[in-house]
Amino acid sequence: MKSFAAPAKHLNDLEVGAVSHLVSVAADLALILDADGVVRDFALGGDSLDSEGFEQWIGKAWVLAVNKEARVKAEALLRDADAGNSVQWRQIAHRSAQGDDLPMLCTAVKLRNSARYRATGRTVVFARDLRVMTALQQSVVDAQQEALHDQWKLRDAQSRYRQLFHTVSDAVLIVDATSQKILEANPAAQQLFGDSVRKLVGATFPVGIESHHVADVQALLGALRSAGRADDIHVQVADKGGEVIVSGSVFRQENGVLLVVRLSRVQSEAAGPARADTNAVLLKLVQSSPDCVVVTDVNGQILSANDAFLELVQLTNEDQARGESLGRWVGRTGVELSVLISTLRQRGSLRLFPTSLRCEHGLVTDVEISATLVRDGGDAAYLGFTIRDVSRRQGGDLRTTKELPRSAGQLSELVGRLPMKDIVGETTDMIEQLCIEAALELTRDNRAAAAEMLGMSRQSLYVKLRRYGLGELADESEKQ
């Protein structure tokens, strides 16, 4: 800090009013504090702070007028003034009458007696209003954030452009409109021209085009430069590269004009037969599938069936199944096919529906059905059924499971799949088997004790053991 060289010469004759005016105009706000830091008076250097209610500060400690977070800085500022340290400015937020923060840049000066240069106990706090600067700083931060956001949006747009440019199946070239130099080429373009153009980027377009089509391409480029649009043309790629359709568009970048040239291969007529061959292979795979595949109309009348279905229902040829209802063989009850068809009409597909299939000789096989509804363009609709034999898998599950249905809801799910008599019979058999196994386990395989515990004769117990596949030890007991 640099002080006046001769303050006594120039300022000694100042009256109190002049000193007061100097102090008030030295800052936006000047506070006079006593030895305890209590505000005793204040002065304003302008009109910008008239409505902030500084009158309420008089008689209160200055540190209580600042925010809690800034009190440490205010107390440090007063300590520095008491110690006579060099003047320091600190940014301190005050509480305004409106409740908002009032940012100010503050410093404190300890008043001293001019005769003996001793401290008088009074301190003057000078404060400069920082609201305009804070608003400018916030504007700068907002502008920076907006610029950063725009930069990220631009980078995202460039990333999407690059992704599309490199993955599009058509050849795309970015050409300078004036020099016709190729500035960028996507991988499809490199693949299209191949060895005929070793270095595509940097070459002059048209390049890699049959010579008798060069004039057509030049005319297209001229139309793009003059009118901004041009009709598509068909040209031949050099070295038997095939026929392509050339189209273009114009866009501006910085101070230059660029052309986007797109070259699309003309689909050969061989694609149709190739697709037909693929469909034929698919039909052959369906016909030879190990799972049953059946196609019906919307009422369940069979239109076509593969060999696996004919084998499972014991039919010799497809004509015997065509025109018959699928419900003739599928379903434990007569209503299951109706339920399947109704579900397909509502949802369009069905997965892993458990049911059974009856062959012509009356044998029943457990199966799972997945089905879908397909519409053929107009109003015609067809149902496709995939039927899988799960009898071996379910048989293993039935032998290993020992769990009863846990609720009436689970039992009700069997309704429609099994007759009520079968549901009750299977449940009763399962309960009997579980009771017998529990009794044998409690009696440590003592048949006589187990029969007595179950309230049945030993002979009846042996019959039950044979029925449930537990009869090996029973036969030995009968021999004794």
Image (tube, rainbow, N blue to C red):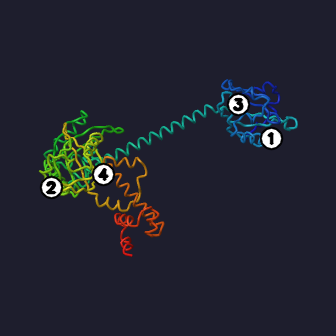
Q: Is residue 178 visible?
A: no
Please state if 291 lies on the left or on the right of 142 as rendered: left
Which quadrant is the C terminus positioned in? bottom left
Kind of element beneath mark 4: strand
Q: Image point 81% across, 27% down: which residue?
A: 14
Answer with mark 3 or mark 1, whichever residue precedes in sequence: 3
Q: What is the number of the mark on residue 82?
A: 1
Between label 3 and label 1, give the one nearer the viewer.
1
Above or below, 140 against 387 in this view is: above
Q: Give the amino acid type for the residue marked by disc 2 in the picture.
A: Leu
Q: Position of residue 17 (x, y in %)?
A: 79, 24
Q: Give the amino acid type for the residue marked by disc 4 in the picture.
A: Pro
Q: Quadrant of residue 2?
A: top right
Mark 3 and mark 2 in contact? Answer it, CB < 8 Å.
no
Q: Which residue is mark 3?
A: 27
Answer with mark 4 or mark 3, whichever residue precedes in sequence: 3
Q: Position of residue 108 (x, y in %)?
A: 75, 37
Q: Which residue is mark 2?
A: 315
Kind of element beneath mark 3: loop
Q: Which residue is mark 4?
A: 354
Q: CA distance from mark 3 to mark 2?
A: 108 Å
